[in-house]
Image (cartoon, rainbow, N blue to C red):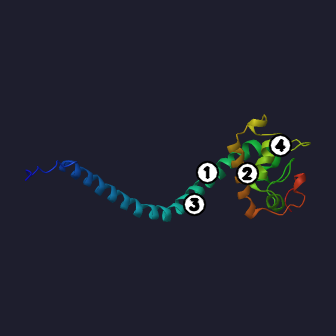
Amino acid sequence: MPEPRDKPREFEPAWLQKSLDRYYTWGLIFMAVLLVAFPLYRIREPGLRADAKAARQHEYVTLGSGLFSSQCASCHGANGTGGTAPTLNSKQFLASATDEQTALLISGGVSGTSMSAWDIDFGGSLTSEQILQIAIFLRTLEPAAPSVPDWRRGAKAN
């Protein structure tokens, strides 16, 4: 009869198994935390985005107002109420032009008129961000904008 053999050595020592179990446990806890945190984040994120957008909008309106006063008011009048250039604070203009169109008009100017390009890329003195700020400022004038049917000629409101 053959002699009984010794039990084979364990492939992994006990201390290694305990260490792996500890990492598995912490991994599961971390995964559970993520499973709870992501839905909470998704619930909260739209409000954070709306707050950031409102803060940016307020900042752009403030900066745009200053830029308009210093760069545009000499031709378009204070707050775009009319002058030697078109009246920008009019229902007709603001209803017909989007912010993007307004920014493009400011950027590239208007051929055949005294409205030159203001974008640095076209030889002007304003950055694209500053031009966007002016366009956003002009949009804030829309709710109280008077009716100026002859806005293209720089007419004042009736």
Give the labeled residue for mark 4: 109
Q: Give, as a three-letter code, the residue at label 3.
A: Ala
Mark 2 or mark 3: name the one nearer the start of the chain: 3
Q: Earlier in the sequence, mark 1 or mark 2?
A: 1
Mark 1–mark 4 CB contact (< 8 Å)? no
> Residue type at mark 2?
Ala
* Residue at the disc numbered 3: 50
Q: Nearer the viewer, residue 34 or 56?
A: 34
- In this view, the residue farthest toward the front is 1
At label 2, counting other C-alpha atoms closer than 10 Å, the crowd grade (few under 14, some 14-19, many 20 or more) is: many
113 lies left or right of 54: right
Specify the quadrant that holds the C terminus: bottom right
Residue visible at 83% across and 53% down in the picture: 87
Q: What is the C-alpha distance between the residues marked 1 and 2?
A: 13 Å
Which residue is painted at 19% across and 49% down in the image? 10
What separation in Å lies between label 1 and label 3 (alpha carbons)? Answer: 14 Å
* Foreground of the two, 141 or 31: 31
Q: Is residue 123 left or right of residue 17?
A: right
Residue 74 to residue 154: above or below: above
SS state under label 2? helix
Please name the residue that numbered disc 1 is placed on. 59
Residue 77 rendering spot, x and y as whole percentages: 80, 49
Mark 4 crowd level (few <14, some 14–19, many ≥20, 10 Å Cα): some
- Where's residue 103, x and y in %? 76, 48
Sequence-earlier tag: 1 or 3: 3
CB under 8 Å between discs 1 and 2 = no
Q: Amino acid at mark 4?
A: Gly
On residue 127, the disc is none
Disc 2 or disc 3, which is closer to the eye? 3
Could you say whether the residue bearing mark 3 is in a helix, strand or loop? helix
Residue at figure coordinates x 73%, y 51% from the top left: 135
